Image: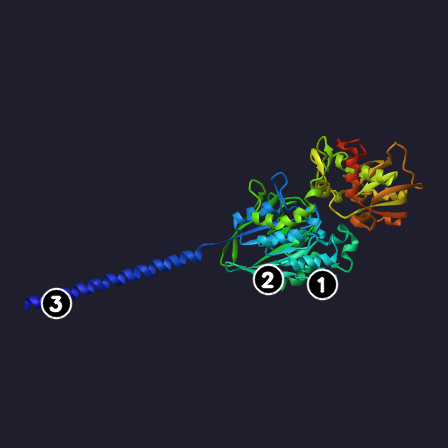
């Protein structure tokens, strides 16, 4: 019996021991699981935002660099949570603009954009085309401060990423009516950017955890929005064409831009604890060193086939580079363009706006496609008779000229920078005399704030596009050498 009792006691002790071990293991497992859950809850939520702006129809790489097809590859490699564009998708290449921006939207549809905004050059093909491209896009094209002629336009969007609600609001520059042909925005109205944000601010804050302004805005407009709404943490912007290697910091707001023509794509890394941003860093990634995205190339091929022959047509040869800008004197490229305009018009003077000339002319063969990129807008050659006083008034801010010699002083106020002006032969410009002047229809309509041309007499629109005038001039000359003759001097 003692043996039996002793056996039962040993069995009981064993069962109790096993129960204690099980309880300890269960407790340990629960503790480990709780710790893991606590660590998981404490770990920051990492979100990657990528952004572009001012692609201007540059779909294909130039000498292997830049363009939306290359950016598509980089985006695929980086795998962002959110991809945004800050406008001016169109107006800049023969491939894009021959089809009014349709190939650009087709490429962007493949890339997974969450939204874009209307830049001023989205209007270059008229309001009907704006509506068509908005309808074509598989992503919203927004603008809170634009009331579109004959169509409705979204203002905001909420996107939830890893539990964080991103409130996106689109804005377009108030400069649009003077930076596209006025006929393209007839019936469309543009409210001040700050006013538009104010209209949506409360509801956007209530529905989101992190607000991003995506704006095609001038630098002054960017700062005005940041100062009026210091709670905005991020402005993804465009329009000025100046890439920001480091973001502009205005209070607690970061302003980012990628430049133009798809040379860079931006990446922003954000960490959140719960819904609160704890860290944000940004950088630019140069669009080079990778193959263009095959799906984008395949999508573009039908359009490309239609324009390739014209795009690659060689007009002449540049013996050296013709840059668009020189800091202290006139530009060889601008001189080429205004000389071509004056010769075609047979006028005493030619003037054109600097913003209409978009990129440099590299050395080597000059193709029609390159001339298109330099002069992508549908501006036509006009002739007009102006008095010397009206010519002088038209030159009150920096203007590209032929047949004149002018001096500007950039240290003076903007409307007082013209120091002197005379004809190319050195004779004075007489205020009361009448001169024949060649310009373009954009300036005639008041574009870039040129107002004197419309006050002239004997106005004729030739219907000849400036790029075709310049192409004809290059074809006639065949060999183009850089010309700097001191016609413009800039004092700094």
Residue at x 76% of width, y 51% of height:
180
Which corner quadrant of the image does residue 421 belong to?
A: top right
Compared with 112, 264 (above or below) is above
Which mark is in front, 2 or 3? 3
What is the distance, in whole Å, between disc 3 and disc 1 at their CAs?
A: 90 Å
> Does 227 sit left or right of 394 as displayed?
left
Residue at x 65% of width, y 62% of height:
200
On residue 151, the disc is: 1
CB under 8 Å between discs 3 and 1? no
**Residue lying farthest to the right in this orientation:** 432
What residue sits right under mark 3 in the picture? 8
Horizontal and vertical percent position of residue 346? 87, 39
What residue sits right under mark 2 in the picture? 205
Q: Does residue 353 appear anywhere in the picture?
A: no
Horizontal and vertical percent position of residue 29? 32, 60
The foreground one among 224 and 1 is 1
Q: Earlier in the sequence, mark 3 or mark 1?
A: 3
On residue 100, the disc is: none
Horizontal and vertical percent position of residue 122? 70, 53
Per the image, label 1 sits on a secondary structure element best described as loop
What is the distance, in whole Å, between disc 2 and disc 3 at their CAs?
A: 71 Å
Residue at x 19% of width, y 65% of height:
15
> Does 354 sit left or right of 437 as displayed?
left
**Dot 3 alpha-carbon crowd within 10 angstroms: few under 14, some 14 to 19, many 20 or more:** few
Horizontal and vertical percent position of residue 467? 77, 43
Which mark is in front, 3 or 1? 1
> Does 384 sit left or right of 239 as displayed?
right
The foreground one among 272 and 171 is 171
Q: Does residue 117 appear anywhere in the picture?
A: yes
The foreground one among 338 and 271 is 338
Q: Earlier in the sequence, mark 2 or mark 3?
A: 3
């Amino acid at each position: 019996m003692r043996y039996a009792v002793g056996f039962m006691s040993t069995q009981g002790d064993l069962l109790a021991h096993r129960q204690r071990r099980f309880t300890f293991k269960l407790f340990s497992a629960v503790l480990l699981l709780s710790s893991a859950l606590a660590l998981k809850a404490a770990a920051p939520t990492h979100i990657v935002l990528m952004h572009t702006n001012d692609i201007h129809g540059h779909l294909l790489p130039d000498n292997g660099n830049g363009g939306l097809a290359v950016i598509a590859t980089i985006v695929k490699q980086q795998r962002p949570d959110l991809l945004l564009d800050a406008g001016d998708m169109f107006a800049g290449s023969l491939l894009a603009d021959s089809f009014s921006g349709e190939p650009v939207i087709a490429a962007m549809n493949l890339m997974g954009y969450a939204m874009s905004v209307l830049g001023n050059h989205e209007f270059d093909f008229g309001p009907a085309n704006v509506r068509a491209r908005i309808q074509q896009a598989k992503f919203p094209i927004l603008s809170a401060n634009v009331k579109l002629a004959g169509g409705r336009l979204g203002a905001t969007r909420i996107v939830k990423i890893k539990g964080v609600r991103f409130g996106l609001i689109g804005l377009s520059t108030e400069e649009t009516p003077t930076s596209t042909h006025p006929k393209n925005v007839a019936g469309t109205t543009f409210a001040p950017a700050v006013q538009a944000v104010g209209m949506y601010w409360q509801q956007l804050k209530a529905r989101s955890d992190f607000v991003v302004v995506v704006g095609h805005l001038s630098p002054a407009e960017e700062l005005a929005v940041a100062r009026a709404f210091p709670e905005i943490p991020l402005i993804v912007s465009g329009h000025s064409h100046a890439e920001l290697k480091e973001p502009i910091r205005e209070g607690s707001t970061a302003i980012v831009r990628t430049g133009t023509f798809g040379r860079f794509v931006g990446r922003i890394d954000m960490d959140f604890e719960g819904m609160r941003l704890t860290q944000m860093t940004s950088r630019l990634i140069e669009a080079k060193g990778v193959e263009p995205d095959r799906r984008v190339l395949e999508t573009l091929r039908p359009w490309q086939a239609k324009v390739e022959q014209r795009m690659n047509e060689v007009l002449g040869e540049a013996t050296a580079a013709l840059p668009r800008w020189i800091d202290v004197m006139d530009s060889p490229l601008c001189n080429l363009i205004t000389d071509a305009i004056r010769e075609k018009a047979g006028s005493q003077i030619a003037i054109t706006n600097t913003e209409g000339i978009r990129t440099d002319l590299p050395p080597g063969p000059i193709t029609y496609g390159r001339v298109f990129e330099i002069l992508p807008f549908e501006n036509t050659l006009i002739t007009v008779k102006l008095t010397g006083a009206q010519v002088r008034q038209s030159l009150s801010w920096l203007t590209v000229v032929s047949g004149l010699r002018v001096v500007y002083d950039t240290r003076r106020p903007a409307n007082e920078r013209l120091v002197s002006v005379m004809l190319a032969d050195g004779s004075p410009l007489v205020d009361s005399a009448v001169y024949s002047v060649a310009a373009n229809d954009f300036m005639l309509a008041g574009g870039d704030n040129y107002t004197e041309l419309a006050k002239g007499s004997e106005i004729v629109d030739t219907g000849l596009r400036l790029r075709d005038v310049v192409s004809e001039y290059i074809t006639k000359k065949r060999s183009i050498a850089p010309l700097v003759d001191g016609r413009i001097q800039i004092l700094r």
